[in-house]
Image (cartoon, rainbow, N blue to C red):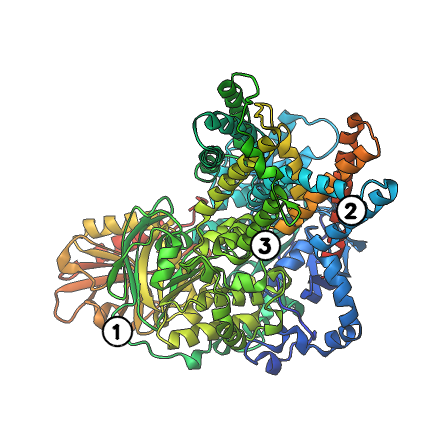
């Protein structure tokens, strides 16, 4: 923990900012129920000035609900919240803001048609009295300046034209404009590239050092270790780890707290079957283009295989599967289903051919709130039906079977509304909707979003079970842990292009994070690789190695004779590359130097790279024909280090 | 982010290790079961009555009927009841189409003008063609105008309110132009058989109205198209993702609405044996009011044809009752408007209470 050496940013209320270590906000026994379901059950949280406090939990643990209660979006059913020792019960976000509590939301709460300036001071518009636009502008410039983004973010640009990262900055500026002494960041990193995440963490660090209390809601452990001082862990709505020093924890202990069981158990790791890799693909798509989001996506999935489509939020995965399903116009792309060419123009064609899609957003794309549970369940049946009647009766037996298999209460199948069910049950009903059609290919977009852990486990089991019957399954997910846990193979999509197709075994979350980074954020590295390959008449690559193999993030070949034997987005065992000696264990602390292959044809220099936080970013290497000399190696090392030298530039 | 119900605070890893967890089944929670069971049977009937909007509105209709029969001895006479039914025909038919439109979340402001224009088409066609052909032409004209509005709204994404407002003006203006600004009379007297013929003592137009409501009810309840209309109004995006033909069934209600406006004016023309370009003026307001009183949500997805029928009867009864009581026609607008708003306000409060209990 650092003392509050920096002056407080943007002149926050002095009383709004607690001294370092002093509890600014204490929430005790907070309980919240929605309809019949408890989202929070006796949750605790303590936030202190000058600290970043992680609120950690798996999907559906109640993190967002708790932070929304603190921010005035929801009201607690019971429990108490003390702000600077006084009990508060915010009835609106305005009350919370007036008390100095702000949330930077997952789905941003900005008005897209208004300018940055107007959005930053939106809460001001609701206050009585006259506005001085020139004074607001001055304050706005001051805030952006303090955030260090005055050069990259104009106050006059419309918010609709900003990137996800820039919008987040606007949200932060908005919180600062309200003199917030306590800012809660609700999953702020899900749509950011690694470079943007770092920039955000820099800003959060500065805010902490100004004495503010920061809450950081996340389910990504490595982020907690990177930035947070203390952590509170929620599981199934209850606090299971209260105010723990991050330094005192290791990753495994944290996972056990979050999940309450082993990860392998959730994903049924020991029940995973071997997929017949020789089988012809059940479905394939090549060169899919559905502008603007989808530019070039290709993948194939075999019968019984679970394929993960990974990437950042906004990478174009949802749009790609919607385009496949005929929900979105395609400009290009060849698709085959069971070897036959297909081109679905609308969903009903895909459904009749045996394709099902569970779209991402349950509330807007799946649930029809005014129809009964049974009719919701039969909605896809109705859609696929050719005759004018409903034919509900014929499905009665199958519904009973599915409800039994999915552990849903059959007594509630005629309930008038699905909205009284928990998120997990709703999701199961939606999955059952598609299982009724007995698809050949089932695509699920973020199937466990907002779902409790018990239901997640059940959903993974369902996916394995239907996979066992030979159905090909595609799962789109931004939760890398889930992707690696549930999928046999992962195709990574970045900026609308499928860039890697790897078995899950070859990956871990960090590799996936780097693979998923937008290509634009890699531009400098790519330029470096191109320059190195060209200048040295060989090939340059960027890889993430582990004990026996590597995943290639990027490779540029200027001289085919020096090709490394792996390409961008591929995994390879060291022994299968053309330069195995280069990766053979050497002294890790020795200065990088050329290592020649035994046959003397190629020599390679491999340089470890880290970002300016000291985070391991893998290795960059250069292959040259013949033998490299020490001077050349030194030049290469200098070039690479120059790229990764600390800089204040936003990636 | 929401979680399933959590029966115990201390999550026992063994229990939660069970597939899907016991917590997903509410009946497995003994405390819930015990609390609800003793009064469940008695409560459920009362709850079903209170929970069904049609039932509530039926009770309201009965209450109004009883009140009026106490206030006016003439109200419950056979002649007046037939009078009531007769007055229900025109607005009742238009309200069927309006129900279709409102169920999809749209609105059709043009029905009054479309009725006026269709009446003129009917009058002109009767000069050249036999009665059935002329009626078919009038209904076809109404349906065609509905198709025009529907395509603009569903295919080109224009606001229903604005499109039908424009069509309302266009149709009325065409009615004046085609008619030469005067009523068309001199129609074949056989046309009035539509109204004055009767079967088993019930007038043909009332029978026709009943048959149409039965048909519309069956369509909306038991066919793919009917359920699609509900689904579109409730969540169009989800309906589309589930493979329903959202475009077709978004256009269809406007076609139905236009056709029913024309059918309604056919009965009215048959009664008067004259077609007036001004006919059907403000008919849209009565139809919308009836549908809304009948419990439909203007946001779509919620409502029923039975509710609309009750809504029509309430409207007609109130107007009839006010006439019987000798209330000045100038005050009748205030009375009807006030009663509509009051009914909706009460309904809003009641349904908010029941849904919170559910």
In the image, residue A484 sits, relative to residue A138, either above or below, namely: below
The residue closer to the viewer here, B338 or A18, is B338
Number of numbered discs on residues: 3
- At 26% from the left and 52% from the top, the residue drawn is A635
Residue to which mark 3 is pinned: A186
- The crowd level at tag 1 (other Cα within 10 Å; few <14, some 14-19, many 20+) is few
Which sits earlier in the primary sequence, circle 3 or circle 1? 3
Mark 2, secondary structure of its residue: helix
- The crowd level at tag 3 (other Cα within 10 Å; few <14, some 14-19, many 20+) is many
The residue closer to the viewer here, A648 or A401, is A401
Mark 1, secondary structure of its residue: loop
Give the mark toward the camera: 2 or 1.
2
Q: Is residue A152 visible?
A: no
Disc 2 and disc 3: Cα gap in Å?
Answer: 40 Å
Image quadrant in which the N terminus of chain A is located: bottom right
Q: Chain of mark 1?
A: A
Numbered mark located on residue B346 in the image: 2
Mark 3, secondary structure of its residue: strand
Give the mark toward the camera: 2 or 3.
2
- The crowd level at tag 2 (other Cα within 10 Å; few <14, some 14-19, many 20+) is few
**Residue B137, x across and y down, in percent:** 45, 33
**Residue B290, x across and y down, in percent:** 67, 41
Numbered mark located on residue A279 in the image: 1
**Marks 2,1: beta carbons within 8 A:** no
- At 43% from the left and 39% from the top, the residue drawn is B155
A368 to the left or right of A380: right
């Amino acid at each position: 923990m650092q003392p509050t050496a920096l002056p407080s940013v943007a002149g926050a209320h002095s009383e709004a900012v607690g001294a370092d270590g002093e509890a600014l906000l204490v929430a005790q026994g907070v309980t919240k129920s929605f309809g019949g379901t408890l989202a929070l059950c006796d949750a605790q949280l303590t936030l202190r000035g000058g600290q970043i406090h992680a609120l950690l939990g798996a999907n559906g643990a109640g993190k967002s609900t708790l932070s929304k209660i603190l921010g005035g979006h929801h009201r607690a059913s019971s429990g108490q919240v003390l702000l600077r020792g006084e009990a508060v019960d915010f009835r609106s976000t305005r009350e919370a803001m007036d008390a100095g509590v702000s949330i930077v939301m997952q789905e941003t709460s900005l008005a897209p048609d208004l300018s940055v300036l107007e959005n930053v001071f939106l809460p001001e518009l609701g206050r009585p009295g006259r506005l001085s636009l020139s004074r607001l502008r001055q304050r706005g410039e001051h805030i952006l300046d303090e955030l260090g983004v005055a050069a990259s973010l104009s106050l006059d640009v419309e918010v609709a034209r900003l990137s996800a990262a820039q919008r987040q900055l606007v949200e932060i500026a908005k919180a600062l404009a309200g003199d917030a002494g306590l800012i809660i960041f609700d999953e702020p990193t899900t749509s950011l590239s690694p470079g943007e995440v770092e920039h955000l963490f820099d800003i959060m660090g500065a805010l902490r050092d100004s004495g503010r209390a920061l809450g950081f809601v996340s389910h990504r452990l490595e982020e907690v270790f990177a930035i947070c001082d203390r952590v509170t862990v929620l599981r199934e709505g209850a606090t299971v780890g209260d105010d723990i020093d991050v330094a005192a924890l290791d990753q495994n202990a944290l996972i056990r707290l979050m999940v309450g069981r082993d990860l392998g158990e959730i994903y049924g790791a020991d029940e995973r079957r071997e997929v017949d890799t020789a089988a012809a693909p059940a479905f394939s798509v090549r060169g899919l283009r559905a502008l603007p989001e989808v530019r070039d996506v290709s993948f194939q999935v075999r019968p019984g295989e679970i394929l993960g489509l990974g990437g950042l939020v906004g990478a174009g995965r949802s749009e790609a599967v919607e385009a496949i399903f005929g929900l979105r116009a395609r400009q290009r792309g060849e698709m085959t289903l069971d070897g036959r060419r297909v081109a679905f123009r609308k969903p009903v064609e895909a459904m009749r051919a045996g394709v099902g899609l569970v779209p991402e957003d349950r509330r807007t794309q799946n649930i029809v709130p005014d129809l009964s549970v049974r009719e919701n369940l039969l909605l896809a049946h109705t859609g696929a039906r050719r005759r004018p009647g409903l034919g509900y009766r014929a499905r009665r037996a199958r519904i009973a079977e599915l409800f039994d298999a999915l552990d849903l209460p059959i007594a509630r199948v005629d309930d008038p509304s699905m909205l009284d069910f928990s998120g997990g049950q709703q999701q199961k009903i939606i999955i059952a909707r598609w299982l009724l059609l007995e698809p050949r290919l089932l695509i699920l977009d973020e199937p466990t979003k907002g779902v409790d852990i018990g239901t997640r486990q059940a959903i993974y089991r369902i996916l394995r079970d239907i996979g066992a019957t030979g159905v090909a399954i595609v799962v789109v997910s931004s939760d890398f842990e889930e992707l690696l846990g549930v999928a046999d193979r992962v195709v990574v999509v970045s900026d609308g292009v499928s860039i890697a197709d790897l078995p899950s075994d070859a990956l871990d979350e960090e590799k996936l994070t780097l693979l998923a980074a937008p290509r634009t954020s890699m531009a400098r590295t790519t330029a470096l690789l191109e320059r190195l390959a060209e200048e040295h008449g060989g090939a340059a690559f960027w890889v993430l190695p582990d004990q026996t193999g590597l995943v290639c993030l990027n490779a540029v070949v200027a001289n085919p004779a020096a090709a490394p034997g792996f390409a961008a987005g591929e995994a390879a065992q060291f022994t299968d590359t053309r330069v195995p000696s280069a990766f053979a264990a050497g002294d890790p602390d020795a200065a990088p130097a050329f290592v020649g292959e035994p046959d003397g044809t190629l020599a390679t220099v491999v340089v470890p790279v880290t970002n300016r936080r000291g985070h391991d970013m893998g290795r960059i290497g250069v292959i040259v024909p013949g033998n490299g000399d020490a001077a050349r190696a030194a030049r290469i090392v200098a070039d690479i280090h120059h790229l990764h030298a600390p800089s204040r530039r936003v990636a | 982010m929401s979680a399933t119900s959590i029966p115990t605070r201390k999550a026992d890893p063994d229990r939660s290790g069970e597939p899907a967890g016991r917590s997903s089944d509410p009946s497995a929670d003994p405390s819930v079961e015990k609390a609800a069971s003793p009064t469940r049977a008695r409560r459920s009937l009362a709850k079903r009555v209170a929970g069904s909007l049609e039932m509530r509105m039926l009770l309201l209709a009965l209450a109004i009927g009883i009140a009026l029969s106490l206030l006016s001895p003439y109200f419950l006479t056979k002649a007046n009841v037939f009078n009531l039914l007769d007055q229900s025909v025109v607005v009742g038919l238009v309200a069927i189409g309006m129900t279709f439109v409102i169920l999809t979340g749209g609105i059709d402001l043009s029905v009054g003008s479309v009725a006026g224009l269709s009446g003129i088409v009917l009058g002109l066609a009767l000069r050249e063609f036999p009665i059935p052909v002329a009626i078919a032409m009038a209904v076809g004209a109404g349906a065609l105008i509905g198709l025009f509005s529907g395509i603009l709204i569903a295919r080109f994404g224009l606001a229903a309110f604005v499109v039908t407002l424009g069509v309302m003006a266009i149709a009325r203006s065409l009615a004046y132009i085609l008619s030469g600004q005067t009523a068309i009379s001199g129609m074949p007297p056989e046309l009035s058989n539509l109204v004055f013929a009767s079967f088993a003592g019930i007038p043909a137009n009332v029978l026709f109205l009943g048959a149409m409501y039965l048909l519309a009810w069956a369509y909306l309840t038991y066919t793919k198209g009917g359920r699609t209309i509900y689904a579109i109004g409730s969540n169009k995006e989800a309906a589309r993702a589930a493979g329903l033909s959202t475009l077709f069934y978004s256009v269809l209600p406007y076609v139905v609405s236009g056709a029913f406006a024309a059918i309604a004016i056919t009965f009215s023309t048959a009664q008067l044996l004259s077609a007036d370009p001004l006919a059907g003026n403000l008919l849209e307001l009565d139809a919308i009011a009836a549908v809304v009183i009948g419990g439909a949500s203007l946001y779509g997805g919620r409502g029923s044809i039975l509710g609309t029928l009750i809504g029509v009867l309430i409207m007609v009864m109130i107007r009839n009752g006010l006439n019987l009581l000798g209330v000045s026609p100038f005050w009748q607008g205030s009375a009807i408007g006030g009663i509509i708003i009051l009914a909706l306000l009460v309904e809003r409060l009641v349904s908010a209470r029941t849904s919170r209990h559910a």
